[in-house]
Amino acid sequence: MNNLLRFLAVQALAYIVLPANASFSSADAARQFLEPHRADCRLAGPNPRLQYCLTESKATIDRLRCLQAHGSAVVSGASVEQRDDRVKSAQDRFAAGGDLQQALLKQTLDRVKAVVSTSPLPALAGVADDFTNTLVPTLLEASGGLNEPQTLGLSVVLPRFLGLRVKLGGYSNPDAELNPLLEKTLLERGQLAGFREQEARLDLGDDYYLSADVSVLGRWLGRDPMDHGRDQSALAWQLMADAPPGQDALSRRFQEAATKIVADAAFSESDIAAVDCAVYQYRKESQQAQARIAQSGLNDFWRLVHNQPQLILGYRRLHRDDLVGADSRTYKIKLSSGLFNNVNFLRWTSRCDKHLGGDDCPQAMDDMLQSWAMRHGLGLALYFEESDLAILRVELPELASAGSALTPPLLQQQIVGDDDVFRLEGGNYQRFGWSVGTELIQMPSSDRESKSSLRLDAGMDYYRYDRDLLRADHDVSRVTLTYRRGLFSFPFHLMYRSETEFEADLGDDLVVGIGVQSSFSQF
Amino acid sequence: MAVYSNHEPQKPCWIGLNSGQQYRLRLRIWERRQGEDGPTLGTISCNEWDYQHLIEQTGGAAGCFETLSLPVTATLWCDFTAIPASNQDMHIEINLLALNNHALGEPFYEKVPKNVSSQPLSLMLAYA
């Protein structure tokens, strides 16, 4: 009973006294937190600089600055020694080489090279559409279809709105030509030479199109960094912290305990040693965390984002002079994605959860960044396009002699008829296509970046027509080799067509093209 | 005593915060592409869990493009770790604001080069 009364009396006294002395209680708790860890520090004694500084400083603020400036001299001292060793070692190497100036020149050139060669190349140049967040127009960009490599144009990406990003573009063919069917008809009628002059007068306004593309953005689709920053930050926490989400890291709690002791005026030599120990632990853990980050691929996480799937809905309005071809409206849906090299694939691995959590997820990310599919930018695109073509009508000169009409050529009989008007019914078509691409070579490459590359893309399109029997279903196979250097790409197209849109049989089933394109916004 | 800043490279520092008064840190992070600022593809993390949680909630470093507000209620010394994307430098600006949005002391600014794997920023906020 006496013991119980004594216990209650102590509790009551503590209840009265402690609130008035709360700061002491807080610092005392900090001491208790730090003491068990002192042995880890292997310090010979209190850091003399910290001891002097803390003793001389009266204000809490000054003591905190002491802690920041002089705390843990053992660690910072070692850092200074290591740095001195590195400097000395470098000087020795230069001296051994016998030419210090040459070594310094090499160092300077290496630095210049590092600056010049740090223009990274997007991994999916040939497959992914560029919807980067910028208002700067992309100039000289080739059109979406690789079977139209000759177009030049300009596109502008508008700011994100309701999870969508819109790209408006205008493209034109600077070298518009006669419609192949019209050309053949004129050839049969012996009137082609007269139309060559009109063909030469065709300019940019006679074969152009306007386009609007909408990219869907989110965590699973699209390449907007805004959608991936959260997972990225969580991934960084896993690399840095020794505590699970929801808790402060141990180093942070060490530092907090040290701060509380320093804020308390009554500290002993033992307290100073504990504070120094805390700062030592804090900095050691911080250095280890920085080392883990340096070894991880977090700096290259953006490459995974860059390879995310893109879903694009597009509309294209084609305007052409009747000599060139029919106007058309085209609706398109396209899905392009990196294969085994994007954030989604990382989420789908057993080593990560859908928020990129999991102890092994940082390593899984690193493995993916080092994988063949990432290094070679393996990617796939699938698309479907529906288009309707307008009626085409061109008035032709009357035939010079009635003799040729006695045996009218096939095309003239079918298309021109008796009224000397070239008329082509409109038609609808569907286009199904796919494309797979990979980077063959990167050259020359530094550790993580390269400034030029050679890329191979291959694909097939199938065109199916209805409404006009004259138009022939056909397929197009193509291989594109793209050399990229700096801002510019130089695609070399090799294309095989089983037939053209019309059964013109002009002997152009194999087409070769060379182009140039650039997308400054990728940099 | 007025609040004042005493920044050093990689060490944003505000001193003399008034006891019992709350403040806000305003964090803004961006990249510069073709002369225009945009969200970064880099990463930021903080060993103060409350701050880390707010960073994640706002969308990580990319979300900090629109600025992130962090509450300040007590003396604090913590580390932010900035991890730039390897293709762009990362720019970080930190302001200390009173609750009436008045900026106190000088803003802190740091550019983290793209060839740096990570850059710790030791933040110190000291109440008087």
Image (tube, helix red, strand yellow):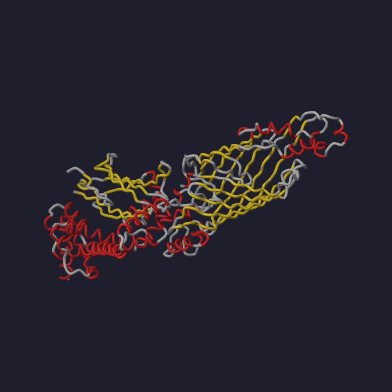
Tell me which corner region of the image, top left, top right, bottom left or bottom right, holds residue A38. bottom left
Q: Nearer the viewer, residue A502 or A304?
A: A502
Residue B61 location in percent, x, y? 39, 50
Reply above or below: B123 against A362: above
- Check the image and name the residue furthest to the left: A56
Tell whether A497 sits left or right of A2: right
Reply above or below: B92 against A102: above
Tell whether A26 sits left or right of A494: left
Tell whether A364 sits left or right of A267: right
Q: Nearer the viewer, residue B79 or B59?
A: B79
At 18% from the left and 57% from the top, the residue drawn is: A262
Residue B128 location in percent, x, y? 18, 48
Residue A6 location in percent, x, y? 15, 67
Residue A346 visible? The answer is yes
Number of numbered discs: 0
> Where is the N terminus of chain B found, in terms of image quarters?
top left
Residue A250 visible? The answer is no
At 53% from the left and 39% from the top, the residue drawn is: A155
Residue A288 location in percent, x, y? 32, 63
